[in-house]
């Protein structure tokens, strides 16, 4: 029997090295900062002038006073607001550290040094100096495999960061990623409509990758259960091809029944009442 999945509600709480998103309570505000700095950086307070600013606009330290991290330490271990940047230094061999969520922009409970390897800011076998910048909260985080590290998918999360490679003087040698604006989201082939919260009628502009036609079971026709993978449903609905692209998702709320059908190479399934649903248009 399928279990009704309600949209994920997440919170920002300090997490031990072994925990996962699934066992985090949901209560605190999304903008909460971390409270436990790494031991090597305890004497480095956030600057008195730190405030939300353009990414890279507020620098908290210099390359010579980089925060020394352990492989498992997360971005949450160092305080900072959106736009605040810190120089940090990673040890070698961090590719197997705790999990990370996202690509280019990561949830703040991701291992900073493992994210740095994923972002190709440092090599898997060598540590080094990096620049870490706090970014806007994202509606979704897409997992990928890069540089020998696999990151995971996630939905909305309140505090994000990205990592840039730097030269010996601290000058960034890789570009800063562009955050996805509010009301838009990138999805993996696996992610479902339930990761995009909102009242009935709320719309999201969604970007899908290619080759999502076999990414999981789809329930419904034209209107789909909230736990149906969005990008496969978009192919079924005829609003995308297997090449991927952009579609508009509209939150539709509870439905009494969903009718299956065969369309565009995908066979969806019939289902009864379900607590969440969505429609897709170009």
Image (spheres, grey):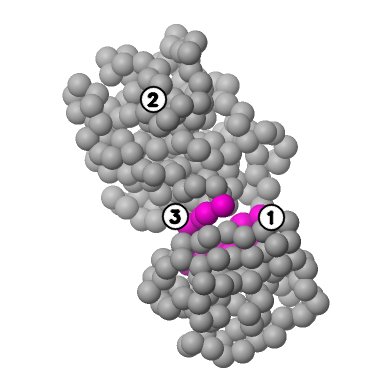
Residue depicted at x 52% and y 72% = 282
Q: Residue furthest bottom?
A: 262
Residue that mark 3 sits on: 143
Mark 1–mark 3 distance (CA, rounded to whole Å): 23 Å
Measured along the vertical axis of the image, is residue 280 above or below residue 43?
below
- Highlighted magenta segment, given as a residue range: 183-198
Q: Helix, strand or loop at disc 3?
A: loop
* Vertical side of 158 occupied by 263: above or below: below
Which numbered disc, 3 or 2, marks the residue that appears first in the sequence? 2
What residue is pinned by disc 2?
57
Magenta highlight on residue 196: yes
State which tag comes first along the sequence, 1 or 3: 3
Q: Is residue 128 at least partly visible in the picture?
A: no
Q: Where, quadrant-wise, is the N terminus in this rendering?
A: bottom right
> In x, y percent, where is residue 157?
58, 43
Instruction: Give the main secondary structure of the magenta stretch.
Output: loop
Q: Nearer the viewer, mark 3 or mark 2?
A: 2
Residues 39 and 197: in front is: 197
Q: Position of residue 115 (x, y in %)?
A: 38, 41
Residue receiving disc 1: 198
Image marks 3 and 2: residues in contact by CB distance under 8 Å: no
Regarding residue 224, the answer to whether it shows in the image is yes
């Amino acid at each position: 029997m399928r279990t009704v999945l309600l949209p994920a509600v997440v919170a920002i709480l300090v997490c031990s090295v072994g925990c996962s998103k699934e066992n985090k309570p949901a209560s605190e505000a999304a903008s909460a900062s971390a409270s436990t700095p790494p031991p090597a950086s305890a004497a480095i307070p956030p600057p008195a002038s730190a405030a939300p600013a353009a990414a890279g606009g507020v620098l908290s330290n210099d390359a010579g006073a980089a925060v020394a991290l352990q492989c498992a330490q997360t971005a949450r271990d160092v305080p900072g607001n959106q736009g605040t940047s810190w120089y940090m230094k990673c040890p070698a061999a961090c590719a197997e550290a705790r999990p990370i969520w996202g690509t280019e922009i990561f949830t703040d409970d991701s291992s900073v040094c493992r994210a740095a390897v994923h972002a190709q800011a440092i090599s898997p076998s060598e540590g080094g100096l990096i620049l870490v910048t706090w970014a806007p909260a994202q509606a979704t985080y897409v997992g990928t495999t890069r540089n020998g590290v696999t990151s995971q998918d996630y939905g909305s999360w309140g505090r994000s960061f990205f990592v840039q490679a730097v030269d010996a003087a601290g000058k960034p040698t890789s570009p800063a990623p562009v955050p996805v604006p509010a009301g838009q989201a990138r999805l993996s082939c696996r992610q479902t409509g339930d990761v995009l919260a909102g009242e009935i009628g709320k719309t999201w502009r969604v970007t899908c990758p290619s080759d999502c036609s076999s990414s999981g079971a789809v329930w419904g026709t034209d209107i789909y259960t909230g736990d149906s993978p969005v990008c496969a449903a978009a192919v079924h609905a005829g609003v995308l091809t297997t090449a991927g692209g952009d579609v508009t998702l509209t939150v539709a709320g509870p439905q009494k029944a969903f009718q299956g059908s065969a369309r565009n190479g995908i066979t969806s399934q019939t289902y009864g009442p379900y607590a969440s649903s969505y429609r897709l248009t170009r």
